[in-house]
Image: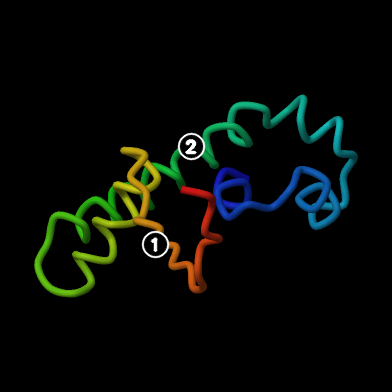
Amino acid sequence: MEALAGFGLSTADIACVLATDEQDLKAIYAHELESGAIKANARVAESLYRKATGEGREAVTAAIFWLKTRARWKGASIHELEGKLPQGDR
């Protein structure tokens, strides 16, 4: 149950696979349904952290992703305009 929730399946999908009512599933397995997603997110975060603090090109990509999502970094935007500005009376 915990693994299915961790993989991102909805309670409706899990109930369908197990041929049971969704409300019964939630009542009996509330803890497993909640903790499955938390544990899966923690494992992915740990893996990303290890990559981001490692070496090589993969580490750079992971570090940039981490900083953009966790530290609110943003990429620089450069806007170039072409043309002439109108001349006013001087």
65 relative to 21 in the view: left or right? left
62 relative to 5 in the view: left or right? left
Which residue position holds label 1? 78
9 relative to 41 in the view: left or right? right
Up-down relation of residue 34 to residue 55 (above or below):
above
In the image shown, does 71 or 7 lie closer to the viewer? 71
The type of colouring in the image is rainbow
**Residue 8's spot in the image, x, y percent?**
63, 52
- Single out the residue that lies furthest toward the front: 90
Secondary structure beneath label 1: loop
Type of amino acid under label 2: Ile
Type of amino acid under label 1: Ile
Up-down relation of residue 13 to residue 73 (above or below):
below
Secondary structure beneath label 2: helix
Q: Quadrant of residue 37?
A: top right
**Residue 1's spot in the image, x, y percent?**
63, 45
Is the Cβ of the residue at disc 2 closer than 8 Å to that at disc 1?
no
The numbered dot on residue 38 is: 2
Query: How far is the residue under mark 2 from the one under mark 1?
Result: 38 Å
Q: How crowded is the residue under tag 2: few (<14 C-alpha within 10 Å), some, or many (20+)?
A: some
1 relative to 43 in the view: left or right? right
Q: Please give the name of the residue rendered at 19% of the width and 65% of the height, measured from the top-left corner.
A: 59
Q: Please give the name of the residue rendered at 28% of the width and 61% of the height, measured from the top-left corner.
A: 62
Q: How crowded is the residue under tag 1: few (<14 C-alpha within 10 Å), some, or many (20+)?
A: few
